[in-house]
Image: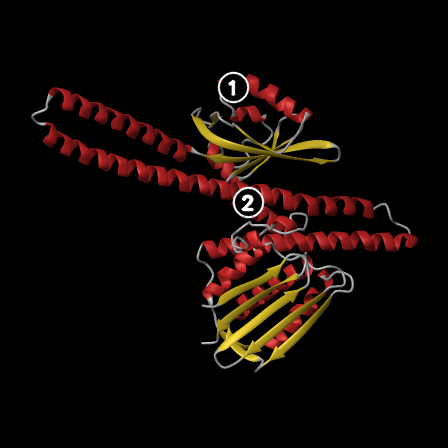
Amino acid sequence: MLNMHFEHLTSLFENATEGIILADTSGKIILINPAAERMFGYNKGEIIGNPIEVLIPDQFKHHHKELREGFYHHPANRSMGQNRDLYGKRKNGIDLPVEVSLSHYRKDGELFVIAFIVDITKRKEIEHNMKLQQMQLEKISNEIRKLNTELEVKVEERTMILKEALQKLEQSQDELSDALNKEKQLNEIKSRFVSMASHEFRTPLSTILSSASLLSKYADTQDQEKRIRHIDKIKGSVRHLNDILEDFLSLGKLDEGKVEVHKQEFNLQECIYDIVEEMKGLQKKEQQVIINFNGHPVINSDKKMLRNVIINLLSNAVKFSKEDGIITITAKTNSDNISIAVKDAGIGIGKEDQVHLFSSFFRAANAFNIQGTGLGLHIVKRYIDMLCGTVELDSELNKGTTVTISIPQI
């Protein structure tokens, strides 16, 4: 099972659209993903073992070594190049405009640095085009003023022609500005994803590594309880990594249009009971899940989608409820409609956060200390929309939350 989850991690690393480079304390590159190799023009594995400065333009290499050494003395997650341009160097010697975010972690006392790299060549081209457009606008404005002074007789005709050209140029500039804003928004979403992913992966991976290393120290029979405790920690961390990866993979498939609705007849009541039984290992101490079912148990819908929806809603209810909390699942069916409500008495959600809950990567203000990707409700909403249904949320701080989905059977 561990191999399967590490395969997911490897797939995420190999298929990321941003460049990812891992360097050791001496600044040598020890890992680089395919996106970074393509970005800098190197073949697979060709760059491994080289100093990171091989990717830095010659005029910046000496200063970069000083910056790198300073970072290793005072490491901190951050974005580079605030208010100034950053460039990398391709294998062919051509400079490449980039954005870089740095993260770090320690393993066996050694510091490793992760660089997340975005190629912003397209953005720079847009900015350059906008500057050219601005220069043309200024030139035309000067011509208009000159014509008004020197050619009063033809001012109306010339002004009309130039105004039309000006309007076209302004429209073009607006289109370029919109394209730049969309590109910046996309990069912000990618940066949030990279930051969130690196943060969410770090904690369970650290737990797995530390517990795995401690297991070897408990070789005696009387240490069985300690071994079991560390094995449980590893299992819990692997489950958490699996949840994160499932959210990422589900979102990716939805965005790529690879998810289709496949309706079939199945027993919804049995499905709900099976999910609750499977998720007992995630429940906190003395938590109870109560199931109320009204109507005919056999329905016609997409079983896989509904199962994922119920798992997401129940997982949220478990995470955000206290140890002895009661969670209620109420399902109602008739010949036309299916309704499922998951209710908890947990921490609740503030009114100001509720309007954003179905957005990707959004976490409520009172939930930042609880593990999660901020994708669960977004994925629920996408699935229910595909099933032509609705999602309603009713919540109050410190009193609990109820999420109700309603979908047609036909």
Q: Tell me if 237 is positioned left or right of 380 in this view.
A: right
The disc placed on residue 193 is 2
In the rendered image, is residue 267 in sight? no
The quadrant in which the C terminus is found is bottom left
Q: Residue tagged by mark 1?
A: 60
Please give left or right for residue 249 compared with residue 291 in the image.
Answer: left
User: Is 1 left or right of 404, judged from the image as shown?
Assistant: right
* Residue that appears at 65% across and 68% down: 275
Instruction: Give the foreground label among 1 and 2.
Output: 2
Q: Which quarter of the figure has residue 32?
A: top right
User: Taking 366 as reference, is 306 above or below it?
Assistant: below
Which residue sits furthest left? 153
Q: Residue at x 65, y 46 (%)?
A: 201
Residue 58 position within the rendered picture, expressed as x and y whole percent measured from the top left: 50, 18
Marks 1 & 2, CB-CB < 8 Å contact: no
- Classify mark 2: helix, strand or loop: helix
Question: Residue 285: percent from the left, percent from the top?
Answer: 78, 61
The one nearer the camera, 380 or 58, is 380
Q: Going 64% across and 22% down the picture, which residue do you hit?
A: 69
Give the residue type that dot 2 points to: Phe
- Give 206 or 175, whichever is nearer the viewer: 175
Residue furthest out toward the right: 222
Real-space Cα separation, disc 1 to disc 2, in angstroms:
29 Å
Name the spot of residue 52 as percent of width and height, x first: 57, 27
